[in-house]
């Protein structure tokens, strides 16, 4: 049974017993849980999965796609706006995940869970990513050519976007999600991921075939 299912099951049956003025759960249930907040776990867990799923399967890939489809400064702006939206969702997902962890962690050890560890690594690197992108943009404006920071920005984004989608799948397993939910996640993530791969691949092929063509910013991706 997942922590979320357990919380949903017991939150309506566990009274908070006061002893010395401090709320405590019944001794036969796991200690160290914030029982008075237990009823919040299913809602917070659902919100965490929803906003993280939207961010990594739709918004972040869409931002990368728009940059390659709109070959002008408007493409760069669309990329920035969509990625900022993705960051808002990601941080909201991080906050709800931390809240769930604080309620359950002392008994379920969620901080040692693979989903939590990988998710934390992904968030940390993606919070660094905008600074890499800013430096890439600054260098590109000066040199009008792709440099090392261009490729760092591209591949950090690609790698951690992929890891984010994979980690979403581990989160669905951890939450004992329904088969329908898992299929829906896989379909949406697969469609946007495939669209990005196809568009990026076509663009790369076009650049290779036309090496003498003036390449707009990020055109080599």
Image (cartoon, rainbow, N blue to C red):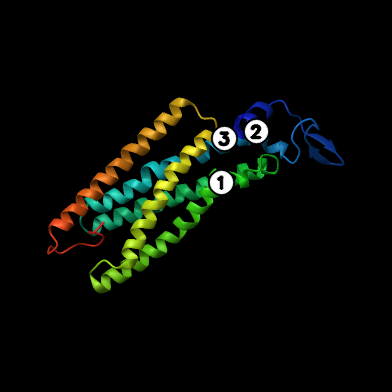
Residue that badge 3 annotates: 43
Q: Which mark is residue 39?
A: 2
Q: Is residue 38 visible?
A: yes
Q: Position of residue 18 (x, y in %)?
A: 83, 36
* Residue 101 x/y as whole percent: 63, 44
Mark 1 vs mark 3: which is more N-terminal? 3
Q: Residues within 10 Å of mark 3 (few under 14, many from 20)?
A: few
- How far from the left and from the top, in percent, is residue 55? 42, 45
Q: Is residue 52 visible?
A: no
Q: Secondary structure at mark 3?
A: helix
Near mark 2 (Cα within 10 A), the count class, few <14, some 14-19 or many ≥20, is some
Q: Is residue 208 above or below residue 183?
A: below
Of helix, strand and loop, which one carries label 2? helix
Classify residue 213 as left or right of residue 172.
left
Image position of 145 (left or right of 111): left
The residues bearing labels 1 and 2 have C-alpha atoms spaced at a distance of 21 Å
Q: Relative to 87, say whether 146 is above or below.
A: below
Marked residue nearer the N-terminal end (1 or 2)? 2
Secondary structure at badge 1 equals: helix
Instruction: Judge whether 83 appears above or below 134 on screen.
Output: above
From the viewer's perspective, tell me whether residue 138 is left or right of residue 28. Answer: left
Q: Nearer the viewer, mark 1 or mark 3?
A: 1
Front residue of 47/209: it is 209
The answer for how far apart the CA atoms under marks 1 and 3 are is 18 Å
Tags 1 and 3 touching, CB below 8 Å:
no
The residue that disc 1 covers is 116
């Amino acid at each position: 049974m997942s922590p979320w299912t357990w919380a949903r099951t017991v939150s309506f049956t566990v009274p908070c017993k006061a002893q010395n003025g401090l709320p405590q759960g019944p001794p036969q249930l796991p200690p160290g849980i914030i029982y008075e907040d237990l009823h919040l776990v299913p809602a917070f867990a659902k919100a965490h999965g929803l906003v993280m799923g939207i961010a990594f399967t739709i918004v972040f890939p869409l931002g990368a796609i728009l940059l390659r489809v709109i070959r002008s400064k408007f493409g760069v702006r669309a990329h920035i706006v969509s990625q900022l939206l993705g960051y808002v969702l990601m941080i909201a997902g991080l906050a709800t995940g931390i809240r769930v962890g604080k309620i359950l962690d002392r008994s379920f050890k969620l901080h040692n869970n693979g989903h939590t560890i990988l998710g934390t690594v992904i968030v940390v690197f993606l919070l660094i990513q905008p600074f890499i992108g800013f430096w890439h943009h600054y260098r590109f404006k000066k040199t009008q050519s792709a440099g090392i920071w261009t490729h760092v920005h591209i591949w950090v984004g690609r790698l951690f976007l992929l890891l984010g989608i994979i980690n979403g799948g581990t989160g669905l397993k951890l939450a004992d999600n329904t088969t329908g939910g898992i299929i829906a996640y896989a379909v949406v993530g697969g469609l946007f991921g495939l669209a990005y791969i196809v568009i990026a691949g076509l663009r790369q092929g076009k650049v290779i075939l036309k090496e003498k063509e003036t390449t707009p910013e990020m055109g080599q991706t």
